[in-house]
Image (cartoon, rainbow, N blue to C red):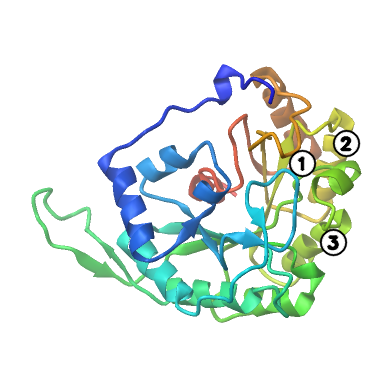
């Protein structure tokens, strides 16, 4: 494996907050993409008392060559998982939460109903938040009637619009619908052979055309793409009115995964910000360690 540049390294952080997040996740038997995908921002996010929930198991029916999640025969869905996700989000007092999943091509709807059930359970709960007007030493907790905003990061559901409708036309739709384009079209056969570039674009376009939900997508760099290919991919996302785009450096999870062809410099990430702005992407988060759900709440607020 190529030596990791210093600016991509993150220190190990272990505080009472990170331990509390792990405890809550363990109590409710929940997985996170932070752990499964070996996200470099895991400890920072745990320190902020948040995590990206990984539903429908921790094994995938596809074998993308950049992803650390294993490809095996998945287990049946846990019907208690939506309630457990909602309980964990309530205990963490999250006002914004990100829920993602493995791809479940074995399920008739790709897991769309399970996604919808998770959103419903979360949004139907009230949050326990201490009023800012209460004295600092007051232990009173006021119950406010507001629901947590939900961003979902989904697979492509094989492009099935009925599955998409199950989510976006529900009584409790998500606030942000994220589906990652991941890389440029030329690299799909190498990086994600079971996916189709145009199908991923069509998923985002369908959500945009049939709802008021914000759409979002992410790109990895460092797999061998060219600057012109990135420019065209950004244009493709702009043409379907994608609201938010994230771009970050691909980091090889293990020597069995795709090698890193190029580590972008910090200056090159600044150039990508300029490119995104020139293309007309209104809201973007671009940087070496940016990931799809990194600082998701802050990014959604400015879109």
Asked whether 135 or 38 is in front, the reply is 38
Residue 203: x and y, percent?
78, 64
Asked whether 207 or 160 is in front, the reply is 160
> Dot 2 corresponds to which residue?
229
**Mark 3 in CB contact with mark 1 (< 8 angstroms):** no
> Residue 199, which numbered label?
3
The residues bearing labels 3 and 2 have C-alpha atoms spaced at a distance of 18 Å
Q: Is residue 160 above or below residue 26?
A: below
Q: Quadrant of residue 2?
A: top right
Residue drawn at x 65%, y 41% as measured from the top left:
284
Query: Is residue 128 found left or right of 141 in the rendered image?
Result: right
Q: Is label 3 or label 1 in front?
A: 3
The residues bearing labels 1 and 2 have C-alpha atoms spaced at a distance of 16 Å
Q: Quadrant of residue 165?
A: bottom right
Residue 193: x and y, percent?
85, 53
Sequence-wise first label, 3 or 2: 3
Asked whether 8 or 107 is in front, the reply is 107
Query: Is residue 3 found left or right of 132 in the rendered image?
Result: right
Mark 1: secondary structure? loop
Q: Is residue 110 above or below residue 175?
A: below
> Dot 1 corresponds to which residue?
280
Residue drawn at x 18%, y 63% as measured from the top left:
141
Sequence-wise first label, 1 or 2: 2
């Amino acid at each position: 494996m190529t030596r990791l540049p210093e600016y991509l390294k993150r220190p190990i952080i272990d505080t009472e907050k990170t331990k509390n997040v792990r405890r809550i996740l363990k109590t409710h038997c929940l997985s996170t993409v932070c752990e499964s995908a070996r996200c470099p921002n895991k400890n920072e996010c745990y320190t902020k008392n948040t995590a990206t929930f990984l539903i429908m198991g921790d094994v995938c029916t596809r074998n993308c060559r950049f992803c650390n999640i294993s490809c095996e025969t998945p287990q049946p869905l846990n019907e208690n998982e939506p309630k457990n996700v909602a309980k964990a989000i309530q205990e963490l007092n999250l006002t914004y939460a990100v829920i993602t999943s493995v791809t479940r091509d074995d399920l008739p709807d790709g897991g769309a109903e399970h996604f919808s059930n998770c959103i419903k359970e979360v949004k139907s709960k009230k949050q326990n938040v201490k009023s800012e007007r209460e004295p600092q030493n007051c232990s009173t907790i006021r119950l406010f009637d507001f629901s947590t905003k939900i961003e979902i990061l989904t697979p492509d559901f094989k492009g099935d619009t009925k599955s998409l409708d199950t989510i976006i036309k529900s009584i409790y739709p998500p606030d942000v619908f994220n589906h990652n384009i991941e890389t440029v079209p030329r690299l799909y056969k190498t990086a994600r052979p079971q996916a189709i570039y145009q199908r991923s674009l069509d998923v985002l376009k369908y959500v945009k055309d049939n709802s008021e939900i914000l759409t979002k997508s992410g790109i990895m760099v460092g797999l061998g793409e060219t600057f012109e290919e990135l420019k065209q991919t950004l244009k493709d996302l702009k043409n379907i009115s994608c609201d938010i785009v994230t771009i970050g450096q691909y980091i090889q999870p293990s020597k069995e995964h795709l090698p890193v062809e190029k580590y972008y410099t910090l200056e090159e990430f600044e150039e990508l910000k300029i490119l995104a702005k020139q293309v007309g992407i209104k809201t973007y988060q671009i940087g070496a360690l940016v990931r799809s759900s990194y600082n998701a709440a802050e990014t959604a607020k400015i879109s």
